[in-house]
Structure formats: structure tokens, C-alpha cells
Image: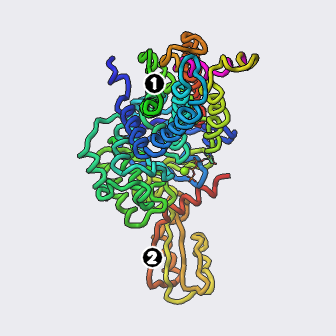
Amino acid sequence: MSSIISISGVTKTYATGFKALKEINLDIERGEIFALLGPNGAGKTTLISIVCGIVNRSSGSVTVDGHDISKDYRAARSLIGLVPQELTIDAFETVWATVNYSRGLFGKAPNKDFVEKVLRDLSLWDKKDAKAITLSGGMKRRLMIAKALSHEPRVLFLDEPTAGVDVELRQDMWAMVRRLREDGVTIILTTHYIEEAEAMADRVGVINRGEIILVEGKAELMRKLGRKQMTLELRAPLTAMPDGLSRYALELSSDGGQLTYTYDNQSDRPGVASLIRDLEAAGIQFRDLDTKNSTLEEIFVNLLRQEP
Amino acid sequence: MNLRAAMNLRAVWAIYRMEMARAFRTVLQSIISPVISTSLYFVVFGSAIGSRITEIDGISYGAFIVPGLTMLSLLTQSISNASFAIYFPKFVGSIYELLSAPVSYLEIIIAYVGGAATKSILLGLIILGTAALFVPLRIEHPFWMVAFLVLTAVTFSLFGFIIGIWAKTFEQLQLVPLLIVTPLTFLGGSFYSIHMLPGIWKTVTLFNPVVYLISGFRWSFYGKADVSVGVSLGMTLVFLAVCIAIVAWIFRTGYRLRN
Ligand SMILES: Nc1ncnc2c1ncn2[C@@H]1O[C@H](COP(=O)(O)OP(=O)(O)OP(=O)(O)O)[C@@H](O)[C@H]1O
Ligand SMILES: [Mg+2]
């Protein structure tokens, strides 16, 4: 059994009658970093909340490491750490008290050394006696991560962990995520910063209007849906496109100095080599050449655009 | 199966300790202020006015009102402690952690209700100790005195817990204690014996559950009761059972917690 979380046929209709999740089937593999992408209101937080036991599902089933989240909720939940989207901490507790509280809540024996290590890793050690209310937003975010890590989870949910977090802290966070993954922790994160998913994730899932519309390995996704662009800087500007090149659907810049060729792995457009040969045959010379891969963000935007 | 394996006792302890820490942090609000306000009653009704009021059931008026006033604090503090304890994390959102933790509903209740009840029992004992400074106090049935104290604290903490889960706003949180509990307690025989009421009111007042609590509690002090002790005990247990049933239903359905 390689998947650590198995979600099958999960739906959620809120009390308002709003159908937030239509029918979710999703398997998260052991030890992977899985990025869940989707626009605002897509149902990311709802799905995470269901797996973590915060919201009741309307139908379907979820297992965590083989434990059903309802029948065997103790075993399932003790494996999970959650860093929610909103900053919600008891403002009057100290950092030290609240992190140790979390550990106790998850049934773990007190372990001061471990909690100290977690706080040090998150640069919170010198704030251990500070009340949560006196922390900055970024520190509060780290405190919530410390709470989630305090009970040594095997699965970590990060619901938009880097929203409103500065660059430095963001990089620290990703370093931490990588370290956790090396320790075998499975990580599921949602983010609006697609470059993060691109940099971090092994697999990407896209959710829109309560439906998972795609789950792919990041590399395959980039390969399948990613596009490449090649831009040629011409020696002499062109006034019109030569007939022999029409099958490439090239774009000519307004000053005639640049030709752009867009291609992907699925289209039947001919390759770069033949384009260069044909350019030569047409007597078009270029000074320079530049290629660029489309980003996950462009893929993502395209995907959502295709949705009805 | 041993208890440690069957229950997440560490979680119960963690919650309980957090709740007690909160009480000591806010000791002014949770202990000192109710003690002061209750002491004022003793001074005003016990010493100042009480000396002009004749004895009731052979008990000086100052001493007569002590059990009722203690009950009054016990009820209101149990409700406000427990309702606030669960409403606050709901309000700020930090309840997510409790809901995502491997704790059963029973453990949540034991911890929160235990914490709230401990606080109000401590408060009740402090008030009784304070009262002893002002009026002559005697306790004829200490076992039953403690039993009523604990039973009432637990029952009304449970009731407060229900209110805390039900409430969607701070107003609602105050509503039940203000509009229902305080009037029922004042009219529940804290300041008088129900035998002193005119005709029909004697019967009407029997629909007030607080009458039974106060009567039973007062009996444990002076051996005199408005209604029989067995009935008092029975009514308290019935109210406890009702609260347990409501809580069980809330947890089975996830009412206002997991929706
Ligand atoms: N308690 C609730 N009652 C009714 N509707 C809700 C509730 N919580 C969420 N919703 C709705 O369900 C949908 C999904 O919300 P959810 O929070 O899961 O989205 P999300 O993908 O996490 O969005 P975001 O990126 O903004 O965090 C939204 O349309 C939201 O309005
Ligand atoms: Mg969200």
C-alpha cells in the first residue's frame, strides 16, 4: 500500500445548501509533497478540514494510513498535523505553553527537548515565554507550524502557509518542508503562489468548483501541458512572413525584428530543427535565439480557462 | 484494555491544565470578584438588615441565606466558566486544533466540564469560608454538602458547555444566564423559604428547578428543607441527565461544531 491518504467519493454540502465538494477521489502517496492548487473558493480548505476531522463530510470515505477517519479517528488523527489557513491562536498563552499543550492534546508524552528543537528550528526559541498576542504575523504563522509539528505527525497539511509571509521566511519554510520530507513526512500544501508548487511539489492536483480536474506528477504536467517558446532575433527586419513558413504559425513582432515560435509536445507542429532549416532556405538569418518553458502558472491559468 | 490505552488521558490533562491556568491568570475576574460581590450580600442582608429580620426555621437570617447565595455563585460561575471556555476557541477559531486532535467527545467534556466545575467548587468553598467570617455557620451533613456542591457544579458546567456550543454571538452567550438562570436563582429561595410565599406561588415556585438545589443544599447545612432531600437530589440528577443527553446529541450530530 503506497498511498498514505485515500479519499474516495467525498462530497460536502454545507448547511447553507452550498455544494462545496462534488465528488472527490484522491490518493496521496507516502512521503510525497503534494500541492493542491485552485482559485479562491474552490474547496481546498473544505477538503483538508474533512480529512483532519474539523468538518463532517456529507458522503464518501477517507483513510489515513489505512485508518478510517470516522471509525478509527484516533489512529488517523494522531498521524496528522495541520497548519490552518487562518491565524487562530489563543492570544493569551505563551509560546511554550501552547506548543506543549498541542503535544499533550495529541496524546504524546511530554518531551521538552523535542519541543525546544521544534521552536529552535522555527526561530521561535527566544520568544518561548512571549504571549502569542505579542508576536508578529510571521511569528504567529511559525507558532502554528510549531504546534502542528509538536506531536511528530507523519502527514502535514499546510493550508496556504506562505500567505502574507516575507521572502526570507518563505524560504526558511520551504527548507523546513524539504527537511521534513527527508524524514519521511508526507506534505500536502495549498498555495496561491504557483512558483512554490513548481519549486516544491512532486505532484500537483488542481481543484476547481469542488472538483478535482487534474492530478499529475509535476514533471509530467509540465511536459504534457507545458509549452515552449522560441524567440529569434533577426539580423534584418522582415516586412512579411514568407509563404514557406506558414505551417509554423510564427508570430512576427510589430517592428519585424523578432519571430516567436510556440510549440508543445502534443501538437503536431513540426520541430525546431526543421524550422531552422526552412528559415535558412528562405534566406532569413538570425543573431540570437532564446527559448523559454511555460510556467506552472500559465498551465494553471489555461486549465481553468478551459473549464466551462 | 487499560484506561491509558482506551482514553487519551494526556489530552484531558492538557486541556484541564490549560483551563486552570486561565483561571489563575484571570483570578480577579474568576475568583475575587464573585467573592466580593457575595460578601457584600452577607454584609447587607446578613449583618445590616438581617438583624432586623426574624429567624427562619430557627436559623438566623444571615446564616439562612448563605447556602442560597453560595448556590447562586456556583450556578452562575459554572455556567459562565464552561460556556466561555468552549465559546472562546470557537469564536477565535482555535477550536480547529481540538477538533483535529485524537480526542473523543467524552474526553473533551471531562476536561472542559472538569475544569469549569473545579473552578466553581473552589469558588464555592472560598465563599463559604468568607461567609463564616460574617455569620455563624454550621454544617450538619458535610458529606451531602460536598455532594450537592459537586453535583451542582458539574451539572451547571455541563449546561454552560451546551450554551457555549449553541451560542453564535457574545450576546447569546450572556442571554441564557441573564434572562433565565439569574431570575430563577433569585426566585429559587436564596433569600426566603418557599413556605413564606403566598398561596398559588408556593405551587408555581415548584416548577423552578433551582428551588430543589437550594433547598437540598441548605438542608445539608441546617437539616431544614423546603422540599424533601430525596426530591432535591432526584431533581438535580434529572437535570444532569438532561444535560448529558443534550451533549450526547450535540456530539453525535456535530451540531455547531463540525459544520
Ligand atoms: N461554513 C461554511 N458554510 C457555507 N459555505 C461555506 C462554508 N465554508 C466554506 N464555504 C464555501 O465553500 C466553498 C469552498 O470554500 P473553501 O474554504 O474550501 O475554499 P478554498 O479553496 O480554501 O478557498 P481559498 O483559496 O479562498 O482559501 C466556498 O464557496 C465557500 O464560500
Ligand atoms: Mg482555503
Residue furthest to the left in view is A113
Task: Answer above or below: position of A134 versus B125.
Answer: below
Residue A50 image offset from top left, x and y in percent: 52, 38
Task: Answer above or below: position of A293 versus B20.
Answer: below
Residue B153 image offset from top left, x and y in percent: 49, 27
Residue to which mark 1 is pinned: B137
Residue furthest to the right in view is B200
- Quarter of the rendering occupied by the C terminus of chain B: top right
Crowdedness near tag 2: few (<14), some (14–19) or many (≥20) residues, C-alpha within 10 Å: few
| Residue at the (46%, 42%) spot, across then down | B32
Q: Mark 2 and mark 1 in contact? Answer it, CB < 8 Å.
A: no
Which mark lies nearer to you, 2 or 1?
A: 1
**A176 left or right of A268 in image:** left
Span shown in magenta: B203-217
Task: Answer above or below: position of A137 versus B139.
Answer: below
Residue to which mark 2 is pinned: A290
Residue furthest to the front in view is B52
Q: Mark 2 to mark 1: distance in Å?
A: 95 Å
Q: Is residue A189 visible?
A: yes
What amino acid type is highlighted by mark number 2? Asp
Task: For mark 1, name the chain.
Answer: B
Secondary structure at numbered mark 1: loop
| Residue at the (67%, 17%) spot, across then down | B206
**B240 left or right of A17 in image:** left
Q: Nearer the viewer, residue A167 or A181?
A: A167
Q: Is residue A25 visible?
A: no
Residue B34 image offset from top left, x and y in percent: 50, 39
Crowdedness near tag 1: few (<14), some (14–19) or many (≥20) residues, C-alpha within 10 Å: many
Is A83 part of what is drawn in magenta? Answer: no
